[in-house]
């Protein structure tokens, strides 16, 4: 573990990033008798699965030097599609929509030089509007097979657990073992240098946005299936939550720094705080307020440096 | 191997290259030289696939080529070592060496093979750096070495070295020389872009001189003398490269006094005094603390202890070392990287100079445009631009540096601290900058210079302070010392004892 932290130049991991979720876990164990119950832990797992899947995508975009605020809207549109379209077509259509949103974000940022914050804010508004137009009032039924995949138990473990493991393994492979990952770190640190090393920077960044939107679609599928109904505004809080989780996990918005382990730690921190406040009966509105404070704190404490000097 | 045939390149309305034609043979080191803005980097960038030519033809072994991307140039067998580092700080040395052409095992990067081959490559350059170190964690000189290693490790027929020695010290330059020899022996063509005359004569077989985007001449280096080459580059004979040093005035008042300055915790203490009218140089190997000292005085690097006093109207005033305080006291700092630390590239020359005058005015005062002052300055400094309203980002390196210095002159400072005053500046502008500094000193200013170009310090400075491990180990007369003597102190910290010559490599 210490070796991991030493390599923080790229992973962004620090003692705090890893200690935060562990400390929270211990505190919650001590303060609430219901926390350690298997039921509650399974519940926490289900609650954070969607956030984890979306955050891993957000993390990828962040490492490549961008940010994607449209993830929440994409989740909402996915949810709307799932309950309005023929069950056989729903999933492919949602994935296709994800690809299109990712392409639009990616090309806007690279070819038209729009700042990713502005670009994804624009697509967020468009996608959110479309989602509400398709499915204005929450309700409807999610295809049964999806619901089974999201809420059943396999070998005693909640299905959410397997969704999480799948997402983590995929992201881990992508970032740490594949050529794509290495190049993502390069593009994020300095796109001009990366280009001179023969990397197709535009294609790479676009691909990161597409993967991020796809992860939002999958997060949206899981969340709708878990809830069992379609809700166009379901993902509203996720755009900021994914960014907060990433920042808590030491991923730097400037690009080039971040890790899967960090994102997981950040998601756990946010998820445990949520669950803890829930157990203690604190208002969910305060939770939202706290997320903002956490984001600021995480960004403020990040050890930033000018990359590329 | 490579022939340029009437190659032309335009940037907007600006003709960067005009019908360049010359041939280069395999198994040789071919220097491409000229003043900055002469078009040598532009020409090489065409070959490296950074941008396409607008006219003419480049032929590789008789076949016309037009690489559109760096990766395409690489495929054609052209490998480039760029002037600006292209290393990524968050990648290890091994990863940087193979970025863009990673050895694969299935869908995974074959890290073991990558590390093994990286170690081989670095060993060939005589470097024992751990290839798993992040490039952001190694010194600038080492980064340049890795950059060179990266370019050389590509199996190519043509290698382009674009100002490879800008940040290298003497020992590394030696290693580079050996490397060039081995490439030449292997029958490769090496382009060596540089305006360091020493290296051109030591390393290169032939030299092509460009001036204002035109090809002046291609000759064998053996058939040229230094003076001939310089006059080809500049278009005039340089009788004197450096301005004459006046006889030192013993009684000149101390402008800046430094006592027991500590730039590293528990490190050695540094004391020095800058007198009005003199130019003092800080010499030493890369990363020995020269930079921290000058930056501490500029208020940019934290100092642990020490006392700095500045002559304000005849009285020595104690200074707090912060940027605001030093600027207010009349100390100007010209950083090594003027593009990011010094100038506002998108603003005009006017605005850049006017901005330097602002901090010393009350915040309520209307910002001065100072047209007369600026026009006068630009004339005096011979800034080559279309107008004072031109964007500084469009100027060549030498002219940018003049604007940078001009800004402080306009602000009325009388102590000038400079880091690498002529990095990326052509021969012609260099002399002009030296002249400006001497002129500034002559009017009663005091100058402190850090430079990795020893010859520059030897030619320019009245006194040279040699820094080694954050300590001043020697104070030498600029006119009376030699390259050898300074290097001796820089390497060992003491004067030569025996007759044996010091080992520079």
Image (cartoon, helix red, strand yellow):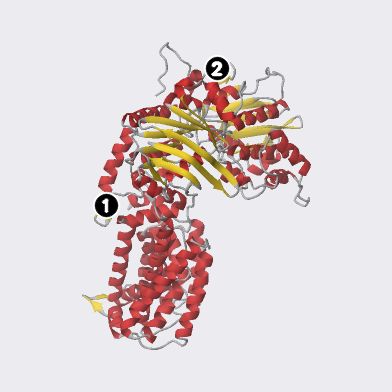
In the displayed structure image, the side of residue B190 where residue B355 appears, left or right: right
Other-residue count near label 2 (Cα within 10 Å), few / some / many at <14 / 14–19 / ≥20: some
- Residue at x 65% of width, y 49% of height: B347
Q: How many marks?
A: 2
Q: Residue furthest top?
A: B499
Q: CA distance from mark 2 to mark 1?
A: 55 Å
Nearest the eye: A225 or B145: B145
Q: Which residue is mark 2?
A: B481
Other-residue count near label 1 (Cα within 10 Å), few / some / many at <14 / 14–19 / ≥20: some
Lower sequence index among marks 2 and 1: 1
Label 1 lies in what chain?
Answer: B
Is residue B165 something one can see in this rendering?
yes
Q: Which residue is mark 1?
A: B104
Q: Is residue B395 positioned above or below A273 on the image?
A: above
Q: Is residue B150 positioned above or below A5 on the image?
A: above
* In this rendering, the label closer to the viewer, 2 or 1: 1
Residue A264 pos. (x, y %): 36, 64
Residue B154 pos. (x, y %): 33, 41
Label 2 lies in what chain?
Answer: B
């Amino acid at each position: 573990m210490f070796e991991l932290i030493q390599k923080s130049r790229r992973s962004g991991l620090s003692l705090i990033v890893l200690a935060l979720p562990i400390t929270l876990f211990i505190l919650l164990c001590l303060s609430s008798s219901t926390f350690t119950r298997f039921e509650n832990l399974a519940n926490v797992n289900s609650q954070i699965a969607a956030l984890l899947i979306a955050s891993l995508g957000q993390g990828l975009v962040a490492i490549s030097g961008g940010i994607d605020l449209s993830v929440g809207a994409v989740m909402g549109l996915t949810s709307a599609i799932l309950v309005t379209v023929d069950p056989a077509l729903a999933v492919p259509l949602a994935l296709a929509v994800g690809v299109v949103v990712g392409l639009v974000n990616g090309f806007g940022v690279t070819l038209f030089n729009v700042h990713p914050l502005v670009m994804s804010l624009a697509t967020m508004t468009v996608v959110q509007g479309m989602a509400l137009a398709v499915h204005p009032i929450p309700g409807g039924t999610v295809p049964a097979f999806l619901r089974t995949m999201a809420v059943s138990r396999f070998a005693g473990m909640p299905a959410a657990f397997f969704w999480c493991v799948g997402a983590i393994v995929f992201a881990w492979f992508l970032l740490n073992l594949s050529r794509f990952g290495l190049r993502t770190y390069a593009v994020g640190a300095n796109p001009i240098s990366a280009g001179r090393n023969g990397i197709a920077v535009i294609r790479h960044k676009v691909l990161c946005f597409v993967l991020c939107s796809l992860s939002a679609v999958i997060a949206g599928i899981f969340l709708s299936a878990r809830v069992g109904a379609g809700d166009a505004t379901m993902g509203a809080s996720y755009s900021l939550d994914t960014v907060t989780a990433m920042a808590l996990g030491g991923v730097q918005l400037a690009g080039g720094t971040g890790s899967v382990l960090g994102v997981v730690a950040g998601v756990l921190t946010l998820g445990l705080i949520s669950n803890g406040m829930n157990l203690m009966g604190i208002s969910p509105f305060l939770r939202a307020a706290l997320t903002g404070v956490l984001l600021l704190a995480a960004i403020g404490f990040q050890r930033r440096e000018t990359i590329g000097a | 191997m490579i022939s340029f045939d009437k190659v032309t390149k335009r940037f907007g309305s600006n003709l960067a290259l005009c019908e360049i034609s010359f041939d280069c043979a395999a198994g040789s080191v071919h220097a491409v030289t000229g003043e900055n803005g002469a078009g040598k980097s532009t020409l090489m960038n065409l070959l490296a696939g950074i941008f396409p030519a607008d006219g003419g033809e480049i032929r590789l072994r008789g076949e016309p080529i037009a690489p559109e991307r760096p990766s395409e140039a690489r495929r054609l067998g052209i490998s480039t070592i760029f002037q600006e580092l292209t290393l990524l700080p968050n990648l290890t040395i091994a990863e940087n060496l193979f970025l863009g052409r990673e050895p694969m095992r299935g869908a995974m990067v074959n890290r073991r093979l990558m590390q093994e081959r990286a170690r081989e490559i670095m060993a060939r350059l005589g470097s024992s750096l751990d290839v798993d170190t992040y490039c952001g964690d190694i010194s600038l000189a080492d980064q340049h070495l890795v950059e060179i290693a990266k370019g050389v490790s590509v199996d190519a027929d043509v290698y382009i070295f674009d100002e490879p020695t800008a940040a290298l010290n003497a020992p590394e330059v030696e290693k580079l020389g050996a490397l060039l020899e081995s490439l030449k022996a292997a029958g490769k063509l090496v382009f060596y872009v540089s305006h360091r005359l020493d290296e051109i004569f030591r390393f290169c077989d032939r030299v092509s001189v460009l001036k204002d985007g035109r090809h002046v001449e291609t000759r064998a280096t053996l058939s040229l003398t230094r003076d001939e080459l310089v006059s080809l580059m500049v278009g005039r004979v340089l009788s004197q490269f450096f301005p004459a040093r006046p006889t030192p005035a013993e009684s000149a008042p101390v402008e800046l006094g430094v006592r027991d300055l500590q730039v590293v915790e528990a490190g050695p203490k540094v004391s020095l005094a800058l007198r009005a009218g003199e130019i003092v140089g800080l010499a030493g190997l890369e990363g020995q603390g020269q930079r921290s000292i000058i930056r501490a005085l500029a208020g940019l690097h934290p100092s642990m202890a020490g006392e700095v006093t500045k002559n304000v109207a005849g009285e020595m005033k104690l200074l707090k070392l912060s940027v605001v305080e030093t600027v207010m006291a009349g100390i100007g700092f010209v950083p090594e990287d003027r593009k990011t630390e010094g100038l506002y590239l998108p603003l005009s020359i006017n605005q850049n100079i006017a901005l330097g005058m602002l901090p010393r005015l009350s915040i309520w005062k209307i910002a001065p445009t100072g047209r007369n002052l600026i026009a006068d300055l630009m004339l005096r400094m011979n800034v080559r631009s279309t107008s004072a309203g031109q964007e500084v980002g469009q100027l060549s390196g030498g002219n940018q540096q003049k604007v940078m210095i001009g800004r402080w002159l306009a602000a009325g400072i009388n102590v000038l601290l400079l880091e690498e005053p002529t990095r990326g500046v052509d021969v012609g502008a260099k002399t002009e900058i030296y002249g400006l500094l001497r002129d500034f000193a002559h009017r009663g200013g005091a100058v402190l210079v850090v430079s990795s170009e020893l010859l520059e310090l030897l030619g320019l400075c009245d006194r040279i302070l040699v820094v080694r491990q954050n300590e001043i180990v020697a104070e030498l007369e600029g006119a009376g010392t030699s390259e050898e003597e300074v290097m001796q102190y820089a390497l060992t910290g003491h004067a030569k004892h025996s007759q044996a010559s010091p080992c520079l490599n």
